[in-house]
Image: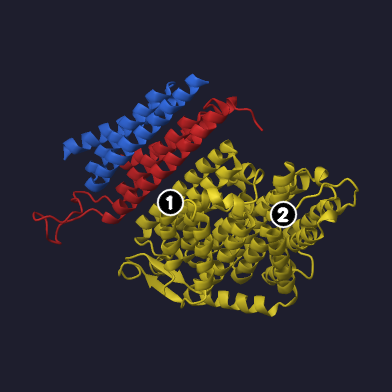
Chain colours: A red, B yellow, C blue
Amino acid sequence: MLQYAAIVLIMLGLYGILTQRNVIKIILSLNIMEIGLNLFIISVGYVTDGIAPIMTTNHNTNSLIYVDPLPQALVLTAIVIGVGTTALGLAIAKNIYSKYGTFELDEMEEE
Amino acid sequence: MSAVLLIAVPLLAAFISILNKKLAPVLLLLVSLFNIVSIFFYSLGTITIGGFEAPYGISLVLDNYSLIGLIVINIAFFLVLLISYEKVKKVATVLLVALAGLNGLLLTGDLFNLFVFIEVSGIAAYLISTTNKKYVATFNYLVIGTVGSSFYLLGLIILYAMVGTLNMSDMALRISSEGISAANLSLPFLFMFIGLGVEAKLLPFNSWVKGILGNSNKLVGPMIASVYAGTISLVFGRILTSVFVVSDRLGLILTVILLVGIVAGETMAFASTKLREILLYSSIAQASLVIILFLEGITGWAVMMVIANVISKLVLFAIASYTSDELKTDEVDNLKGIFSKNKIIGVAFTIASLSVSGLPLFMGFVVKMNVLTSIFDGEDYLLAAVILLTSIVEGVYFVRVLIKLWYNKEDAKTINYNFVIKYIVSVLAVLLIVFGTYTTVLNDQVETVNEVFEIGGNE
Amino acid sequence: MELINYVEIVVGVLLIVLAFLAINSKSLIKAVMFLSSMSMMSVIGFVLMKAPDVAVTEAVIGSGLVTSLFVFTLLSVRKVGNKA
């Protein structure tokens, strides 16, 4: 069920990137898209009635059904990369503000 | 020594360079030089990382294809550093990360690792482009680049759900053995095509190029247009030749889109009056042409074309960006006669631009002729006609620019090019002539590249 | 099992509504708050899909660090704006 929500989130993020003209809003839409993407990746590895892929003293046999751990490792990397891009985008946004005095792309004078 | 040092040493140096800002540019030059020298000592083969065997762990692939790419890209990177040494000081750490990312892109044999390196080199590229001081253009680049790599990740994960592996060679094997049809592969393929197409400057996804390269200084211009573009083209080539089987119908659609990209790029270049804009539109057309060649399966000569582009774009963008840095303008009309005062620079620029448009004696001619021969062998006359026509258009606008720039005028502006850029561009220009006349080297390299894909390939 | 299905539906609908609000709200700081709460909802989604390690990371980095980055940017910009 959640993968449908994830796809809608990716689409909403794209909609935000395309329609918004505010620098902060565009970075925010990027974040929404990334969250949707992360949910989608996790849902790819989900197995119905599976358990979390962590070996504990309670579950230490191979006969149990685990969800696929590889997409989770991918998402951990993707989250960190996403934070890096967001931080860089916000730094550039701050530079834009100190140069033009506004966040709105339409109010900036084209050069 | 194993080739992982090509990635590990720049990353380590990047961390060290944070500690000592003054040492950072020197460290950058040393590491870049170390990379160039050490490439020649590595033995070919697959390198497993962390002790996990190939389909399970991440592996780096060093074959003749990636070896050629590594040599060209590392040397070009070093030359760009020398040309723009005073700009490098501020972004030395970023450039070290960029070097690690570019080497990783060429070496990796794992699709997710490729995504990580796209992001690493992409973030470095955004930071390098901030030295233009055009923050809105950099922001556009960042947004488009991030959306593109997100699309790449989406395609990647759909592919993983279908095939169940991320290793490139393993994926090619499983696609053929499990009989996954090309129609089913077209969705993830298109997503990945979009993601890589953003970085490779293909037509519908390249609105960032004008903002970045149209205002480029002498670091950003050669770095993005020559080094980055060459790397991404080679990555595209690896994915198109060794992972995917493109179905005929999809291949036709992509070829048409790319042909439109070539024609549009050349037309825009013909119409624009600014030196850097002419060059950037021409490089958009060249990028589309290279991807078409990879799609058509002319892998060896496509690699040679990438190399010819790296060399000639390095010369062209270095000279154009240096000139417009000094004069604060790049309207061709304002630059009239600058070459009559700087003969060496002028000759190098002339050779590089004529090589791009494919005149005899130069490397571009040899590449284009062999490409056309193999296209005529495949009886694809439309493609050949478009390539020939765009070559003529290219020749016309380059000659038009050259006439204006060589035009002898008394009040022409004088620019003092420093001796580093003079030496580098003249050596590269001589290299273009050498490869253009002494073609056995190229033929040998083409054969070694083609052999790589005949063994593990899917033809 | 029925309960989990209902929770999934509620989380999914909340995610979409919060994302829409974040994109379309007029005030920037409100938009950032909607993004933060959306991130918390996605944490619940990760837990439901049996990925507790991702959930912890997303709660700390996605919801905490990213929100604080946005808020600090907006605050520092407001200071610059007052000076000018």
* Distance in Å between CA atoms under marks 1 and 2: 31 Å
The answer to which image quadrant residue B85 occupies is: bottom right
Chain ID of residue with mark 1: B
x, y percentage for residue B356? 73, 61
Residue B18, labelled with which disc?
A: 1
The residue mark sitting in front, 1 or 2, is: 1
Chain ID of residue with mark 2: B
Callout 1–callout 2 Cβ contact below 8 Å? no
Disc 1 or 2, which lies upstream in sequence?
A: 1
Q: In the image, is residue B98 above or below residue B54?
A: above
Q: Is residue B252 visible to the viewer in this orientation of the structure?
A: no
The 10 Å Cα crowd at callout 1, few under 14, some 14 to 19, many 20 or more, is few
Residue C53, labelled with which disc?
A: none
Q: In the image, is residue B120 above or below residue A12?
A: below
Task: Count the labels in the image.
Answer: 2
Q: Is residue C46 left or right of residue B146?
A: left
Instruction: For mark 2, give the secondary structure.
Output: helix
Check disc 2 and report the residue beneath it: B319
The 10 Å Cα crowd at callout 2, few under 14, some 14 to 19, many 20 or more, is many
The answer to which image quadrant residue C4 occupies is: top left
Task: Report the residue at 22% width, 34% height from top.
Answer: C7
Please state which amino acid type lies under the numbered disc 1.
Ile
Q: In this rendered view, identify the residue nearer to me: B407 or C7.
A: B407
Task: Report the residue at 26% width, 31% height from top.
Answer: C10
Q: Is residue C7 left or right of residue B105?
A: left
x, y percentage for residue B251? 57, 58
Q: In this rendered view, identify the residue nearer to me: A75 or C79.
A: C79
Q: In the image, is residue A14 above or below residue B264?
A: above
Q: In the image, is residue B446 above or below residue A108?
A: below
Q: Is residue B164 left or right of residue A56?
A: right
Query: Seen from this angle, which residue lies furthest left?
Result: A58
Q: Is residue B421 visible to the viewer in this orientation of the structure?
A: yes
